[in-house]
C-alpha cells in the first residue's frame, strides 16, 4: 500500500466534498443576503466547517482584512449607501478611522476616487491621509466648487478636508451618496505595488520580443527633495522594445543611502512616505514606503520596492522611459536630514511579457546606471542675517539733564533679513556697553526698548535686563522677548530695528563725558537670537553683526555740523606747488556759552587752539612735513581773541582754510586731503578747555587733490 498516495487521495476527496458543501452554502447565503458572498464571509464559512482549523482562524481573518472587500465573483461596490458623519478637520498626515471613512466616501464616486488600485482603492481603504487622499479631496472640492470654493474666493482645490468641505461631504452623505461598481483588486502584500491602470489596449502584436539598451536618463539628477515634498521625480531610466509588443508587469526599484549627516539613517522607511512609478508622463503605480515591511532587503544597506501587476503595453520599436518619484515624510528626524540616496533598477528588475507569452527582463545594477538625489529636513537653507542699517546714528554728543530723564534716544539701528524662507523671530539680544572708566550701565539707563515698524517691544526675558543691573558694569546683555507677538519676516525681506533708551538724570548717577554703545556681535547673535521657519534656526543659520557708535553724554557743551568743503591746487611759477583746502562747519552751544580760540593747529602739535586738523596723504596717513599755514574764521563775535558761541542761540559758522606745500619725503604729484579732528571750547574766555569730536568724520574732510604738475 502506498501511504503517500492514500494520504493525497484523502486530501483531494476532502477538498472535493468541502468545495461542494461550500458551493451550496455560498449559494444559499448569497440568496439570503442578495449580493455576492465576500471573501471574509467565505473564510468564516470555512472556519465554521473546520476546513480552516481554529488554530489558523486568526491568521485567515488577518489575511482577508489586508485584502479589502473583494468578493468571490462578479463585482462589488465601494460602499452602497453613505452612513458616515465627519466631525473633525483632516489633512495630509492625519490618521484614524474617520480617514478610512473619508476614503470610502470619496471612492463612492468615479470622479473622486482615491486610487484605482492598491492602497486607498475601493475595498483597500486605509486610515492614513496621504498624497492620494489629498488629491481626491481636491477633486471633490472642484466637483462642488460652487458650495465649497466659490464662497471662499478660491478657484482650485486645496486638498484639506476643512469646515466647508466637511459640511458638503456630510450633506452628500445625508442624501445617500453614490456608488460605483469596481472589479475585485488583487491584494497588496509587503514589498509590492500595483498599477493605477493599463493603456486600455491589451492586444499584443508580434511574437517573441527583446528588451535592450537599458540606460539611465540624464534628467532628473541630483534633485534636492525637502521634508513634506510630494511626488518629486528623482531618477529616470529607458530601454528599447524590439521585435514585438510587450506588457510591462513588474519593476524593482532599489534605494541605497550613500552619505549623510553624522548619525544619519540608511533605512528608507524613516524618510519616505511613498514612492511612485511613471511610464512617460503617466503614473502607473504608487506604493507606501513608510514601514519596514514595505521594503525588501537587497545587498549591503540597499532596499528594494517591487511594483507588480502593472499591465502597461509598450509597442514594438518604442523606447520606454520609466521615472521614479518620491514623497518625503513631513516629520523626518534630524538624524535623517541631508541624506544622499542612490536609485537604480537592478539586473532583471524589469519584467515584461511578450506576445508569445515569454517573460523578457532588463535592468542594470552597475554604478554607471544609477541616479542620486538628496533629502533635506524642512528649513534647510533658511538663514537670518543681522546687519548695521545705513541710518544708524554716528558717534555724537547727546545733551542730557542734571535733574530729569532724557527720553527716546536712538543709539543703534540694524536690520534683520530672512533668506531661504519665511521666518518668525521670538527673541532678540542687545548688548549695552559703557566706555572704560565711565559709569556703569545701570547708572546710565532708565529704560530700554526696541521699535520695529512702529511697534514697540519692551518685554525682557525673565532674569535679564533692567531688574538685574544694580551692580552691572562694563556691559550688560538684554534679551527682548517677542514670543507673544512674534516678528514675521517674509523670505528675502528685511526689517529695521531701532534700539531706543531713556537716560537717567545726571546728578548722583554719572558724570559728563560718560559714553555708551549698543551692539549685537556675531557670537551674541548666534547664541541668543531665537527664530524659526520650517524648522528652528540654530547658530549656524544666523550670521552678521551690528556694532553701534559711541554716544557721549554731556549736560553742557557744543555741537558741530558740517556745511561744506573744497580742495584745489595753486601752481606757482618755478616754485613748489601748493594745495588749498577749506572746511566749513556750524557750531552751536547748549547750557553754556562756548569760547573757541581763533587759532587752528595741526593735529599732534601740542598747541592749544580753537580747532585741530590733520593733513593725510593718499594712503590716509597723516603727514608731519611740508610747509603749512591755517586760518580759522567765524561769524561769531570775538572776546579776548576767542570766538564766542552763545548758549541756545543760533549756530555760528566757522571756516578752516589750510594751505599746504609738500616737500622732503612727501613730495609733489601725490594726493592729499584735510580733515577737521576736534573743536576745543571753554565755558569762559581762557578757561579750562574741553574737546568735541566732529562726527561723522567723512563729513568734516575735503576730497583728495593732487598737488603737482
Image: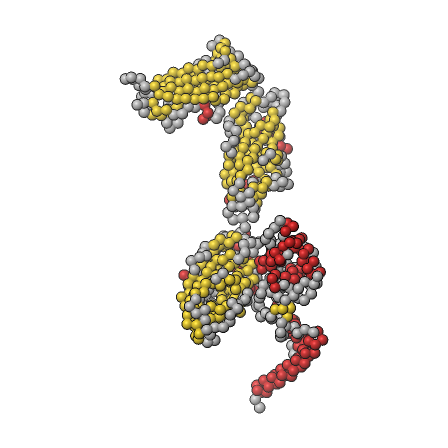
Asked where in the image residue 228 lies, by quadrant, the reply is bottom right
Please determine whether, in this image, residue 505 is positioned above or below residue 32: above
Q: Tally the numbered discs.
A: 0
Asked where in the image residue 666 lies, by quadrant, the reply is top left
Q: Depth check: give the residue in front, 658 or 605.
A: 658
Please determine whether, in this image, residue 184 is positioned above or below residue 419: below
Q: Which residue shows up at 68% across the image and 55% down it?
A: 167
> Furthest residue to the front?
146
> Residue 238's spot in the image, x, y percent?
44, 63
> Residue 285's spot in the image, x, y percent?
53, 64
State left or right for residue 310 relative to residue 613: right
The reply to whether residue 225 is in sight is yes
Q: Which residue shows up at 38% across the image and 19% down it?
A: 580
Q: How is the image coloured?
A: secondary structure
Q: Depth check: give the residue in front, 114 or 512.
A: 114
Please determine whether, in this image, residue 529 is positioned above or below residue 56: above
* Quarter the N terminus occupies: bottom right
State left or right for residue 48 relative to residue 638: right
> Residue 679's spot in the image, x, y percent?
48, 19
Q: Which residue shows up at 50% across the image and 47% down it?
A: 381
> Furthest residue to the top?
640
Q: Which residue shows up at 50% across the image and 64% down it?
A: 304
> Furthest residue to the bottom?
1
* Quarter the C terminus occupies: top left
The reply to whether residue 522 is in sight is no
> Residue 345's spot in the image, x, y percent?
46, 64
State left or right for residue 317 relative to residue 144: left
Q: Depth check: give the residue in front, 283 or 485.
A: 283
Amino acid at each position: 500500500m502506498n501511504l503517500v498516495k492514500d494520504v493525497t487521495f484523502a486530501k483531494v476527496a476532502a477538498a472535493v466534498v468541502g468545495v461542494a458543501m461550500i458551493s451550496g452554502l455560498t449559494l444559499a447565503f448569497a440568496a439570503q443576503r442578495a449580493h455576492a458572498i465576500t471573501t471574509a464571509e467565505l473564510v468564516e464559512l470555512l472556519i465554521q466547517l473546520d476546513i480552516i482549523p481554529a488554530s489558523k482562524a486568526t491568521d485567515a481573518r488577518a489575511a482577508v482584512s489586508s485584502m479589502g472587500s473583494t468578493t468571490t465573483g462578479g463585482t462589488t461596490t465601494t460602499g452602497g449607501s453613505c452612513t458616515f458623519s465627519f466631525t473633525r478637520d483632516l489633512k495630509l498626515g492625519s490618521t484614524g478611522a474617520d480617514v478610512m471613512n473619508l476614503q470610502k466616501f470619496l471612492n463612492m464616486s468615479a470622479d473622486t476616487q482615491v486610487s484605482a488600485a492598491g492602497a486607498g482603492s475601493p475595498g483597500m481603504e486605509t486610515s492614513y491621509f496621504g498624497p492620494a487622499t489629498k488629491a481626491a479631496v481636491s477633486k471633490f472640492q472642484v466637483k462642488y466648487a460652487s458650495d465649497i470654493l466659490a464662497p471662499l474666493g478660491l478657484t482650485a482645490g486645496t486638498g484639506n478636508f476643512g469646515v466647508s468641505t466637511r459640511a458638503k461631504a456630510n450633506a452628500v452623505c445625508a442624501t445617500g451618496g453614490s456608488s460605483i461598481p469596481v472589479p475585485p483588486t488583487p491584494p497588496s502584500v509587503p514589498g509590492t505595488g500595483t498599477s493605477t491602470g493599463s493603456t486600455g489596449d491589451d492586444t499584443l502584436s508580434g511574437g517573441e520580443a527583446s528588451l535592450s539598451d537599458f540606460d539611465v536618463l540624464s534628467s532628473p539628477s541630483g534633485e534636492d527633495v525637502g521634508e513634506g515634498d510630494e511626488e518629486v521625480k528623482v531618477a529616470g531610466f529607458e530601454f528599447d522594445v524590439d521585435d514585438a509588443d510587450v506588457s510591462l508587469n513588474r519593476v524593482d526599484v532599489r534605494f541605497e543611502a550613500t552619505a549623510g549627516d553624522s548619525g544619519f539613517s540608511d533605512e528608507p522607511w524613516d524618510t519616505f512616505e511613498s514612492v511612485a512609478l511613471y511610464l512617460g508622463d503617466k503614473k502607473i503605480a504608487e506604493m507606501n514606503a513608510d514601514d519596514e515591511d514595505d521594503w525588501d532587503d537587497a545587498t549591503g544597506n540597499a532596499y528594494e520596492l517591487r511594483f507588480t501587476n502593472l499591465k502597461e503595453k509598450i509597442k514594438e520599436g518604442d523606447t520606454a522611459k520609466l521615472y521614479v518619484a518620491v514623497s518625503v515624510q513631513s516629520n523626518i528626524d534630524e538624524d535623517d536630514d541631508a541624506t544622499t540616496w542612490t536609485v537604480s533598477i537592478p539586473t532583471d528588475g524589469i519584467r515584461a511579457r511578450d506576445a508569445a507569452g515569454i517573460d523578457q527582463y532588463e535592468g542594470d545594477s552597475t554604478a554607471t546606471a544609477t541616479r542620486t538625489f538628496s533629502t533635506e529636513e524642512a528649513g534647510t537653507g533658511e538663514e537670518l542675517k543681522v546687519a548695521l542699517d545705513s541710518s544708524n546714528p554716528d558717534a555724537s554728543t547727546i545733551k542730557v539733564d542734571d535733574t530729569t530723564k532724557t527720553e527716546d534716544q536712538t543709539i543703534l539701528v540694524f536690520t534683520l533679513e530672512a533668506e531661504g524662507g519665511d521666518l518668525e523671530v521670538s527673541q532678540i539680544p542687545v548688548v549695552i556697553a559703557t566706555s572704560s572708566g565711565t559709569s556703569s550701565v545701570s547708572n546710565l539707563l532708565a529704560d530700554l526698548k526696541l521699535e520695529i515698524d512702529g511697534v514697540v517691544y519692551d518685554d525682557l526675558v525673565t532674569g535679564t535686563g533692567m531688574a538685574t543691573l544694580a551692580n552691572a558694569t562694563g556691559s550688560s546683555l538684554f534679551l527682548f522677548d517677542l514670543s507673544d507677538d512674534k516678528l514675521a519676516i517674509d523670505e528675502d525681506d528685511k526689517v529695521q530695528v531701532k534700539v531706543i533708551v531713556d537716560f537717567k538724570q545726571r546728578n548722583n548717577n554719572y558724570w559728563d563725558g560718560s559714553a555708551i554703545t549698543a551692539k549685537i556681535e556675531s557670537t551674541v547673535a548666534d547664541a541668543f537670537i531665537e527664530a524659526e521657519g520650517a524648522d528652528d534656526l540654530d547658530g549656524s543659520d544666523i550670521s552678521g553683526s551690528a556694532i553701534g557708535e559711541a554716544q557721549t553724554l554731556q549736560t553742557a557743551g557744543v555741537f558741530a555740523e558740517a556745511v561744506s568743503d573744497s580742495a584745489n591746487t595753486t601752481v606757482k611759477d618755478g616754485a613748489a606747488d601748493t594745495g588749498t583746502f577749506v572746511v566749513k562747519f556750524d557750531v552751536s552751544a547748549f547750557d553754556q556759552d562756548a569760547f573757541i580760540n581763533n587759532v587752528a593747529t595741526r593735529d599732534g602739535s601740542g598747541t592749544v587752539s580753537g580747532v585741530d586738523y590733520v593733513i593725510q596723504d593718499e594712503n590716509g596717513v597723516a603727514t608731519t612735513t611740508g610747509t603749512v599755514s591755517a586760518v580759522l574764521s567765524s561769524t561769531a563775535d570775538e572776546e579776548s581773541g576767542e570766538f564766542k558761541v552763545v548758549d541756545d542761540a543760533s549756530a555760528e559758522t566757522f571756516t578752516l582754510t589750510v594751505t599746504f606745500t609738500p616737500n622732503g619725503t612727501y613730495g609733489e604729484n601725490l594726493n592729499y586731503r584735510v580733515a577737521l579732528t576736534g573743536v576745543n571750547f571753554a565755558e569762559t574766555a581762557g578757561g579750562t578747555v574741553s574737546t568735541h569730536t566732529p562726527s561723522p568724520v567723512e563729513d568734516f574732510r575735503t576730497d583728495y587733490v593732487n598737488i603737482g604738475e
